[in-house]
Image: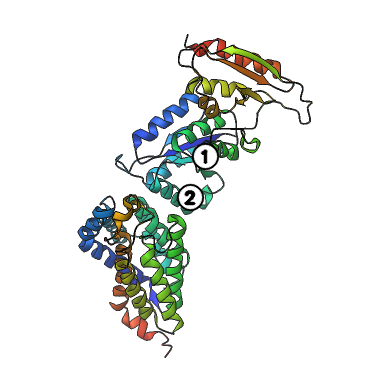
Amino acid sequence: MGLDVAWAERWVRRTADVVAEERDHLTELDRQIGDGDHGENLHRGFQAVVAKFDEPAAQERTQVGDVLMLVATTLMSKVGGASGPLYGTAFLRAAKRSARPSVDESGVVVLLEAALEGVTSRGKAKVGEKTMVDALAPAVEAATAAADAGHDPVEVLRAAAKAADAGATGTIPLVATKGRASYLGERSAGHEDPGARSTALLLGAALGAALEGGTADVAAGADPE
Amino acid sequence: MSVGLVLVSHSVRLAEGAAELAREMAPDVVVAAGAGDTDGGLGTSLDVVQGALDRVLPGVDGVVVLADLGSAVLTVESALELDDDLAGRVRLADAPFVEGAVAAAVAAQQGGDLGQVLAAAEDAGAPAQGETPAAVAPTPVGPAAAGEAVGDAVTARVVIRNPLGLHARPAAVVARAASAFGGPVTLQGVDATSVLRLMALGTAAGTEVEVAARGADAQDAVATVVGLIEGGFGEV
């Protein structure tokens, strides 16, 4: 047993909470190099997702992918700017690859890989362009290494979250060549990319959700050691 | 076969304005705006884009979408990815917003299919100088018989009479008329079925232009275009 539907829902609710707390910070980062709406946009999007969780569901969500699909469609509808379609596509591709009741350590890697593939294909961004990709790509790499080393899903997520955090911090000296910040050219250096930071927050919330209440699941799972 | 257009912009007014321009040149084509955020403010919204597609699709065989900046493109791509049923009927053009919308509308008015209307929009972004590539020229919808002997070109010279010259609306009138004939029709050497190439000539009032056509109905084609120009497009 790995990370289940309840984990996915906890992940999204924690993300909504974290984004609510950090929205001013994200907006301030975005104000420096973008158009200053990233925090508010993501906050509105994740609040809308939580509102959908609280509605009576037309159909019971039995698969991790069901939760992620709801996130995808809601973010695409509610979040303006580029981050709605980008995060929406990330969750959409992840949802398509996680149509199962729970994900194990390799399932976490597949989910993150699909998300990265969604962001890079939609946004046409590569590593080093000061975007979400600079947090998500190292997260996928670290998650893959952790899963290959036989770690459990929680440790895979821990590796991903840590790498995403470092990746986001690593965007500070970069000069943006994609997205709104690229309009600033050299002047975008010295500021952290808000999309990379929000990606790190999202993965931090995924880890938090796995640690919280998820320990029973993980303990019951087959430990490779 | 009919093709409609959906114009996706951050600005409702920008999209409505482009739609107005396109409809002026292509009165029978369905052109809808899918613009702004859900409150009508600046932005793009999946719901708004899907709403525009839902309004247009029932009445047409296909839809070409034009989008303005970054997230408008991303939103359209997301809408297409979310609904597999759209894939065969809706195409996003990689084209300049206004020029693409006008070229696509005229191609749709001329009876072009989805691929031809898309090509017309995307060709609008190509340099206007030089030859029209045959591969992207709108296919004439007239009764051209394959293998028909192509005779010598029929040509005539005519002076532009209307005060504003070959601006958007007259160019569209000429393009629509020229596309009804079987053979190639040119004006000053450019493809007379292409509204953008006609507009790019920047022909002013008082200029003498050469109209040329080939094919079985070349005489009619030249006479028709000359007649339109001499008529002053209702502006004299």
In the rendered view, tell whether residue A65 sits above or below residue A207. Answer: above
Q: Where residue B187 sits: x, y (%)?
A: 60, 22
In the rendered view, tell whether residue B154 sits above or below residue A175. Answer: above
In this orientation, which residue lies closer to the viewer: B112 or B234? B234
Q: Residue at x 43, y 31 (%)?
A: B19
Q: Residue at x 62, y 15 (%)?
A: B224
- What coloring was used for the rendering? rainbow
Q: Where residue B110 sits: x, y (%)?
A: 59, 28
Q: Residue at x 30, y 78 (%)?
A: A211
Crowding around mark 1 (Cα neighbors within 10 Å: few <14, some 14 to 19, many 20+) is: many
Q: Where residue B81 sits: x, y (%)?
A: 48, 53
- Give, as a three-letter code, the residue at label 2: Leu
Circle 1 is placed at which residue position? B63
Residue farthest to the bottom, as pictured: A225
- Can residue A59 be seen by looking at this rendering? no
In this orientation, which residue lies closer to the viewer: A78 or A21? A21
Left or right: A89 in relation to A169: right
What subunit carries mark 1?
A: B
**Callouts 2 and 1 close, C-beta under 8 Å:** no
In this orientation, which residue lies closer to the viewer: B16 or B156? B156
Circle 2 is placed at which residue position? B80
Quadrant in the picture for the N terminus of chain B: top right
In this orientation, which residue lies closer to the viewer: A90 or A73? A90
Q: Where residue A96 sits: x, y (%)?
A: 47, 64
What subunit carries mark 2?
A: B
- Give, as a three-letter code, the residue at label 1: Val
At numbered mark 2, what does the secondary structure look like: helix, strand or loop? helix
